[in-house]
Amino acid sequence: MSTTTTHRPFRFGRWFRATGWRHLIGVIMSVFAIFPLLYVLSASFNPSGTLVSANALFSVVDLGSYVQLFGLPQQPYAAWYGNTIVIGVTTSICTVFLGAMAAYSFSRMRFTGRRVGLLALLLVQMFPQLLAVVAIFLLLNGISDIFPAIGLDTQIGL
């Protein structure tokens, strides 16, 4: 005995009511998130050097700003950018590695201080990171009183 399957015709209305509206909302939100990035990129290619202009996106494309930025020998921007990439990648790898080790130990092992550590982690995550900005500023401002070379208004402090 064989079974035959009947192929139902595709109904756009049924699909849209079930899942299609989610796709539409996702596309609208993606455009909403990408537009500011495109606007800033277009402004960086604008030869007038202003963010406010009546031109459409990418109506005038000029690489003069980038040539000037990367061409100054007094300010090695390319080296600074490379240093930033190296520091960012190294920090990300170390953070993920240490976070994975801590998560494994908290989830699989029983040790003294485990409960206190988990409660402290929960307590820290309950407050927004923006609350720490004032405390960090006060700490760095206090460091400049003790070690003026690494204060807020120095090149090393930046």
Image (spheres, helix red, strand yellow):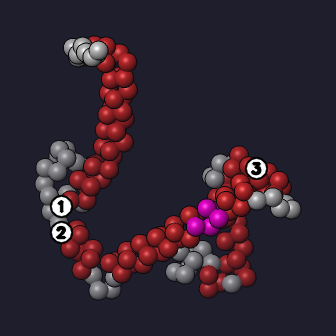
Residue extent of the magenta highlight: 97-101
Along the line of sight, the residue nearer the viewer: 136 or 99: 99
| Residue 6 as seen in the image, left or right of residue 121 | left
Q: Secondary structure at mark 2?
A: helix
The residue tagged 2 is: 64
The quarter in which the N terminus is drawn is top left
Eyeballing the image, is 80 above or below 137?
below
Eyeballing the image, is 152 above or below 133?
below
| Residue 63 as seen in the image, left or right of residue 101 | left
Residue type at tag 2: Gly
Residue depth check, mark 3 versus mark 1: number of the one nearer the observer: 3
Q: Residue at x 61, y 62 (%)?
A: 100
Q: Residue furthest left?
A: 60
Nearest to N terminus: mark 3 or mark 1: 1
Q: Is residue 11 magenta?
A: no
Residue type at tag 1: Pro
- Mark yes or no: residue 62 visible: yes
The residue tagged 3 is: 123
Q: Residue at x 17, y 66 (%)?
A: 63
Q: Secondary structure at mark 1?
A: loop
The residue tagged 1 is: 47
Residue 141 pos. (x, y %): 68, 71
| Residue 32 as seen in the image, left or right of residue 96 | left
Eyeballing the image, is 37 above or below 143?
above
